[in-house]
Every structure is written in structure tokens, then in C-alpha cells.
Image: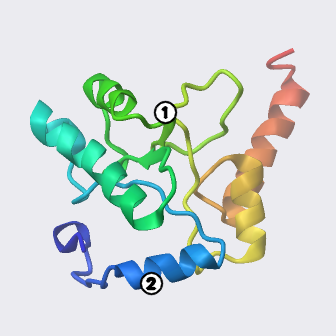
Amino acid sequence: WCEAHNPSGATYPLMDAEQIRDLQCQGFRFESHTRSHADLPTLDDDALRAELSGSRADLEDLLGNRVDYLAYPFGRYDERVLKAAKAAGYAAAFSTQPGFNRHDIDRFRLRRLDVFGTDTPAALVRKIQLGSNDGSLGNAVRYYMRQVTRRISGVGR
């Protein structure tokens, strides 16, 4: 899977239909990430439609329920991809832009944080509190030092 985009060259097997259904029975949700993990802005209109609509239809057939959400492969999208995702019937889509999703965020540009199995509970809490993919203690200290400095200097009052 995505061997060309994995710097280590390691590959990992994808789940098969039985594994997906088993996890669904355990409460996991599955949403779309396209059929082939293509770089969507580089596709022609027909290929883009096939990736988005085809993935959604394939998953709905497999899962027996609606698939409403899309995660853009590599987080890459443009205005044409946004329009195609809407036309394919998705309710919302996720980018790879970190940060907070405020009430006025475009639902086809939702932000998300990277969470890894190697993240400690404390690092995960820092990622959530800071809206950052950097959950290190050093990043948190730098952030709070900037906040203190701004308050002391009166910036932002």
C-alpha cells in the first residue's frame, strides 16, 4: 500500500472484506478514502468521479450502510475535487490540515490531527489542547511561553 510514498519502503497488507465486516460488528466505522488512494487533483474528471463515487458505492455495498465521509488521500484537494466530492454525495471531507474545527469551517475542509500508536496519552492530550500534530512537551512549553510573553507585553489586548 502506497509503497512509492513510504520512505522506509515498508508495505502493509490491506484489510479484506471479512476483516472489515468483523471490525464493523465490533463498533468500528468505515468511511471513504477513495478506491486507489490517488492524488485527486491530478485526475481527469472521469477518473475523479470514479474514485469518489466508486469508493462510496463499493463501501456501501460491503457495509450495508451509508458512507458519508471522505478523507482526501495525502490531504490533497482543490476546488474541483471539493465540487466532485459534493456531487458524489459525501456530507463532509477531511484534509490533513491540523487545527481546530470551529463552527464556521467548511465541512469539506475539516481539519484533523495525526494520532499514532506510538503517541503517549500525555502527547495525545497536548495535540488535542494545542490543535497541533506536534504533541511533544517542548512544543507545549514553547506555545505556553509565547502566550505568557504576549500577555506580559500587552500584545492582543
Which secondary structure, mark 2? Answer: helix
Residue named by callout 1? 109
Q: Nearer the viewer, residue 87 or 7?
A: 87
Q: State the colouring used for the structure image.
A: rainbow
| Image coords of residue 120 (percent x, y) | 70, 77
Q: Quadrant of the C terminus?
A: top right
Q: Is residue 43 left or right of residue 152?
A: left
Q: Quadrant of residue 78?
A: top left
Residue at image coords 41%, 84%: 18
Q: Quadrant of residue 11?
A: bottom left
Which secondary structure, mark 1? Answer: loop
Q: As displayed, is residue 53 above or below residue 105?
A: below
Q: Quadrant of the N terminus?
A: bottom left
Circle 1: residue type: Arg
Residue named by callout 2? 19
Residue at image coords 50%, 62%: 30
Q: CA distance from mark 2 to mark 1?
A: 30 Å
| Image coords of residue 54 (percent x, y) | 25, 49
Q: Is residue 137 left or right of residue 52?
A: right
Is residue 96 among the parts visible in the rendering? no
Q: Is residue 108 left or right of residue 73?
A: right
Q: Nearer the viewer, mark 2 or mark 1?
A: 2
